[in-house]
Amino acid sequence: MSSPPERSATEAPAAAAEAAPKATDVRLTGAAAMTLGVIVSCELVLMLDATIMNVALPQIRGGLGFTPAGLSWVTNAFLLTYAGLMLLGGRAGDILGHRRVFLAGMVLFTAASLLGGLAPNPEVLIVARAAQGLGAALAAPSTLALLTTNFRGEQQVKALGVYSSVTASAMTLGLILGGVITTALSWRWVLFINVPIGLFSVLIAPRYLAESPRRSGRFDAAGALTSMSGLVAVAFALIRAAEHGWRDPAALAALVGGIVLLVAFVLIESRTSQPIMPLRLFADRTRAGAFAVLLLVPMVTMSMQFFVVQFLQQVLHHSPLQAGLAFLPMAIGMLLTAQNASRAIARFGGKAVALTGVALLTAGVAWLVPITATTGYAAGIAGPLLLTGAGLGLVVVPFNMAIMSTVDPAESGAAAGVLQTAMLTGASLGIAVLSAVYASTIEENGDSATRPTVHAIAEGMGTAFTVGLAFAAAALLITLLVVRRTDAR
């Protein structure tokens, strides 16, 4: 029996938009609410770990004796394994069953969180963070695939709206929670908090989550190896260049090797019969544009958060708690817009909502470009955070719908894997690229890279935000020129 034909990216979001007015009034009760709660809580804890450690980094460095260069791997070990193995995790769910792979990923993620919290030295913490990334790479694609498996019709639109709201706000909430937990307890509890949530999900998921149909097939080992190795090599090159400059042989070799591996990955995927990233996912113009925007947007937002946290602590001398709470405007902006995005899509159309979101995000980054050492929080930081958060909430929902509601169910795991790989890869590469710009600006000005002045810090960040603005402008152009209307209006 042949599989149902794949829907175009202009048909399914139209149906979603038509259902959205009703879906916003749908109440999920009983088993349906518990099912959504399990999926969303797990996605939340996985996404939180991309940023929750950032505010705690100074305490981790002092507690375990990290070098300045080694400290960056507390974040990068997680992001790189998470992004590099995401496509494999999505494919594994399609073949073995999404619930089964989700549970395996959560078990590994929970155990790694416990190990990291108990880490006696830097090496153990980095290994634990890499294992967390592997567990997240297995579990995360299955959360979105299980959502589409367990919900249909109006309930699915409602569930996608809730899921997208959580996804949009998770990374910013991670900064806030990281500051609160680090101040009230210690940095180790930033990892320990994952353990009860993980155990709860593993125990309760078999009761409330229906297993997706298993698909016959095989794993694309060559594709998985080249994609993971290529992403890691490129990210390593950018991180290395931020520390040693582009004349460093290791940085250049890693960059060239990474590009070669990624080209090989595309060639492999075009020829294999069962790829982990079916290239036909990019055949639809709107879906391809959505993937591109979801790569560029985290390059802007994650690097923005990365630098603003440092500015708050190094220039404005905020405590970890103050630095975390300083991101409340961003979280509030995201929650408000993401919760109302489905209603806005129904009224104005998906493209209009997404375009508004990217425009707000671009305006927020532009506001940060002229930052100086005398910039205050109220006048120069809170406003950009609010605009960026509001924009992000309007971006994630329509593009999630445009991607996930237009693919064959047999490839839902692959589509979710590509979507989340794009976002995580963007986050990692954005931090690496803008860190290189920041470091080179300080070096060109003859300031100390290890102990820069507050004026040098602000100038370097201003230059980095200028590059971030270019990424945001590219996302705006893609949304305007590439993405077609995603509603039936």
Image (cartoon, rainbow, N blue to C red):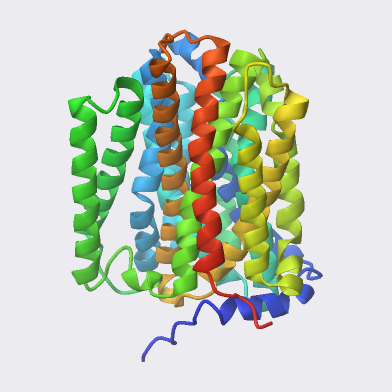
The answer to whether residue 81 shows anywhere in this view is: yes
Q: Is residue 121 visible?
A: no
Please identify the quarter of the rendering in which residue 205 is found: bottom right
Is residue 122 depicted above or below 284 in this figure? Answer: above
Q: Is residue 54 left or right of 35 when viewed as pictured?
A: left
In which image quadrant can residue 18 be found?
A: bottom right
Give the residue drawn at x 52%, y 36%. 466
Q: Is residue 416 above or below residue 411?
A: above
Q: Residue at x 48, y 32 (%)?
A: 113
Where's residue 77, x and y in %? 38, 33
Q: Quadrant of the C terminus?
A: bottom right
- Which residue is the extreme one toward the bottom? 1
Q: Residue sitting at 38 percent across and 12 percent down? A: 67
**Foreground pick, 309 / 315:** 315
Residue 305 occupies quadrant: top right
Residue 265 at x, y = what percent? Answer: 23, 57
Please name whichever residue, 345 or 172, is drawn nearer the observer in this view of the structure. Answer: 345
Measured from the top left, where is residue 157 in percent x and y? 67, 70
The extreme right residue here reads 25
Q: Residue at x 47, y 21 (%)?
A: 118
Where is residue 374 shown, x and y percent of the image? 68, 16
Residue 109 position (above or below residue 4): above
Location of the N terminus (image quadrant): bottom left
